[in-house]
Image (cartoon, rainbow, N blue to C red):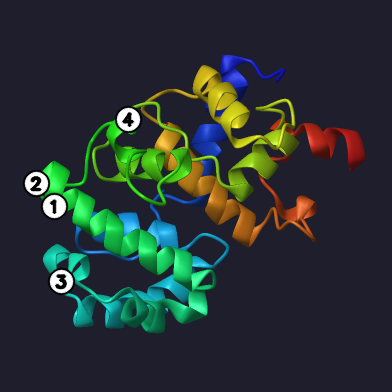
Amino acid sequence: MNKTPEEVRAIVEELKVLYPEGICSLEYKKDYELLFSVRLAAQCTDERVNKVTPALYARFPTLEALAEADISEVEEYIHSTGFFRAKAKDIVLASQMLLRDYGGRVPDTMEDLLRLPGVGRKTANLILGDVYHTPGVVVADTHCIRITGLLGLTDGTKDPGKVETQLRAVLPPEESNDFCHRMVLHGRAVCIARRPQCADCTLRPWCDHFAKNC
């Protein structure tokens, strides 16, 4: 973590040039659909989730329908996302809790979001950032953890909580949510885990990994 504020800002701005739309690649129409899509994306690609959810939400078009759904039927719709039994149970139970405790509205605080079945800090931060545009949220997914460590924005820890804390300390609060989405896009397009395209990466001037290894 040896970046100056000017270097951090330069990285943020270059990512904006590369990926003008710093948005989540999960497709959704309602707030709770994003919540459940993030749950389905655990150990699964966003692309696969986006193929599964249209049929799921066509069969269960409202939160009430999901809350009353037979878990085994939900399992059939999401089977290909993996860990489908736990995910289906979480979706149905979370739907029931949203209706019972929150009037059918996705909560807007970390504390309340973490009460929901299947919701951890990563999911909660994504909801706070994408739905409620809360400044300073950090979605520490695998791409974000890996690439910020290579850049030197974090100390290289793989602990999501520590990465979140370290990035909150250096990123401009109004940029942090979109920054994390752009990290995902960059991890898929350029800084690929098994074969990073360092020669083609325009973040090279600020990258600790490139400075040490290339």
- Asked if residue 16 shows in the view, the reply is no
Q: Please, what is the three-letter code of the amino acid marked with disc 4? A: Glu
* CA distance for labels 4 and 2: 17 Å
Q: Which of the two discs, 4 and 1, labels the residue nearer the N terminus?
A: 1
Tell which of 157 and 135 is nearer to you.
Answer: 157
- Asked if residue 7 shows in the view, the reply is yes
* CA distance for labels 3 and 1: 11 Å
**Residue at disc 4, secondary structure:** helix
Q: Quadrant of residue 207?
A: top right
Residue in view at x 19 percent, y 59 percent:
30
- What residue does disc 3 label? 65
Which x, y percent locates residue 180? Answer: 49, 42
* CA distance for labels 2 and 3: 15 Å
**Residue at disc 1, secondary structure:** helix
Q: Please, what is the three-letter code of the amino acid marked with disc 2? A: Gly
Q: Please, what is the three-letter code of the amino acid marked with disc 1? A: Leu
Q: Quadrant of residue 165?
A: top right
